[in-house]
Amino acid sequence: MQHIIIGAGPAGVVAAETIRKYDSEASITIIGDEPEPPYSRMAIPYYLIKNIDESGSYLRDPVNHYRNLNIELVQMRVDQVDATNKQVKLADGRVRSYDKLLVATGSRPVNPPILGLDLPQVHSCWTLKDARGIAELAQPGANVVLIGAGFIGCIILEALVKRGINLSVIETGNRMVPRMLNEKAGGLLKQWCLDKGIDVHTSCSVQSVISAEKGVKVSLSDGDELTAALVITATGVKSNLEMLEGSGIEVDQGIVVNNQMQTSHSDIYAAGDVAQGMDFSTGKYEVQAIQPTATDHGRIAGMNMAGKATEHHGTVNMNVLDTVGLISCSFGLWMGIEGGEQAELYSPDQYQYVNLQFDDHCLIGASCVGKTQHIGVLRGLIESKITLGVWRKRLLGNPNLIMEAYMACTQELGYNQKL
Amino acid sequence: MQKSLNIDPAKCTGCLQCEMACSYEHTGVFNPSKSFIKVFTFHDEGRFAPYTCTQCEEAWCQRACPVDAISIDLTTGAKVISDDKCVGCKVCTIACPFGTVNYSQDTGKVVKCDLCGGDPKCATACPTDAITYVDADWTGYSRMQASAAKSLHSIEVTT
Ligand SMILES: Cc1cc2nc3c(=O)[nH]c(=O)nc-3n(C[C@H](O)[C@H](O)[C@H](O)COP(=O)(O)OP(=O)(O)OC[C@H]3O[C@@H](n4cnc5c(N)ncnc54)[C@H](O)[C@@H]3O)c2cc1C
Ligand code: SF4
């Protein structure tokens, strides 16, 4: 059995490892187009603040791990998938045949149509190569403009500030991380950043970027004009689907898959940022573009490819973010549902916020600011659909009791089990 | 046979010796707020329950880690964080559905129970045997693990 995996990111690597776990005989090849050993984009911020060197971003030991598992790594771009003949065409002309194929090609950043985003001072922050370019220009004291305060933007924000640059952040939404935090929580983040000397513009867009004497001039819709040595865009991503053109595989925003991560072609699977997998909370199929989802997809695709039929029950969309020391997180339907109930605790002076969303007796979503202890249990409560019983009311009174609620509802606490 | 922590909340008096011992072992100071095992208080019922990582089979934290910083100690079965490799991204803290991997502002990394390399100090410190370190059998601890696992069936093998 020949398995081919396109894309050497977390989804591809976890899938390869999973196939090997269930099939010691199969041939497994990962074909990825980046020049580095398989690495994690998530580690890029820590490379930028020099906490790690490039090797610290590697997903696994670059030499021994793949050799020990007998996984072949090929560094080349796949230009085309020929689903009829079960072959992939590589950029150097080689053709490889597969029995089962996984497309784990991830996504890439997209820029809005703003004049001047093609200037050499404008970078996105997506690959190690991008990070090297940013590290060169983001020198201490430099003026840097970050376009987009979404999840990825905010992650890069922290790294940039730690490099000692002067940062301006421009976000079209009315708050920071609008797709992860509500107005109160996003507002806390903005206030925190302003207090730290970061120039944050919300409900504001960039009109143009033009060459200036030392770098570029950035014009904003609120009338401000900023000069910068570097502009970083973090304005969204789109799935890498080009190699599927003409293959007949069904695509939408990402690749359409069923609950076994199988595409419209039964021998072809998809996983990670490129796949439109099931969202646990809504049951809908959508691109989540987060790391835990990529590895989950990789594992389920790998099991099915190895012949171990496994169903995916959806991944909870979740994020955790460190914004120059203020930690926030969100899970599932943090925005709540119609007819649902909310428990909320808001202490802006302490930069503390907890928001729990209920559907009847189940927790369905949550977001927090300034909370770092036991936050994973929010995922546990949501994903296990635990009936909270009396604890729903207790949580409505004190949303901080999440751990107690979880324990009382799931654990046999000796004599406490009737809690 | 590997051993595991056996937790019997019915015996817990809430004295916090386990938290003291754990924090001392891992940080060098007696400070319950830095402990990896946590005693939860159920005020209405006047009960206590110690809780920590069950070293679960799924190892959600390990799978989510982007840089391979979580490994399995082959002698104890504990999932252990490598401080050298951990970048402090905190993804494991939201991936662990039991809430037992936590971020430490002191170190900028995450912390979790590592079974003290096979000599868990919480068990030694507990005066009432609410926490013991015993052969991994059908202990309270494996019950805790099982009931937690049962509640989380996001994945189901169909054949
Ligand atoms: C700076 C940054 C910080 C992030 N931080 C977080 C975070 O804190 N938490 C979180 O959950 N997520 C985070 N993410 C998102 C996370 O990195 C992605 O969700 C994850 O990388 C997706 O994994 P993947 O394997 O699907 O895709 P990728 O990691 O993108 O890997 C896909 C690989 O396929 C290759 N490829 C594409 N097309 C082809 C082709 N035709 N032929 C061969 N190879 C191809 C790509 O070059 C790439 O190497 C971050 C991303 C960035 C950029
Ligand atoms: S915080 Fe450390 S151990 Fe946890 S996922 Fe991130 S790098 Fe891995």
Image: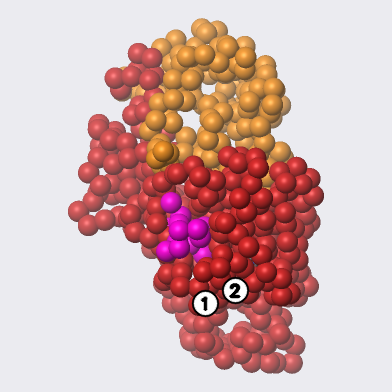
Chain colours: A red, B orange
Instruction: Identify the amino acid type marked 2.
Output: Gln
A83 and A64: which is toward the camera: A83
- Expressed as whole percent of the image width and height from the top left, the position of residue A71 reads 70, 50
Q: Write the residue at 77% across / 47% down.
A: A67
Q: Write the residue at 58% across / 39% down.
A: A22
- Expressed as whole percent of the image width and height from the top left, the position of residue A325 reads 59, 53
Residue B9 part of the magenta segment: no
How far apart in space, not on screen, are marks 1 and 2 (Cα)?
7 Å
Instruction: Identify the amino acid type marked 1.
Output: Glu
The boundaries of the magenta stretch are: A260-277
> Of the numbered discs in the image, which one, if any, rests on residue A245?
1
Residue topped by disc 2 = A80
Residue at the limit of the structure toward the front, as seen here? A85
Looking at the image, residue B70 sits to the left or right of residue B4; the answer is right
Mark 1 vs 2, N-terminal side = 2
Disc 1 + disc 2, Cβ < 8 Å? yes
Label 1, secondary structure: give it: loop
Q: Quadrant of the rendered structure where residue B114 is?
A: top right
Does residue A415 sit above or below A22 in this rendering? above
A259 and B1: which is toward the camera: A259
Quadrant including the C terminus of chain A: top left
Q: Write the residue at 69% across / 26% down.
A: B74
Disc 2 crowd, CA 10 A, few/some/many (<14, 14-19, 20+):
some
Q: Is residue A254 visible?
A: yes
Q: Write the residue at 33% across / 19% down.
A: A417
Residue A271 part of the magenta segment: yes
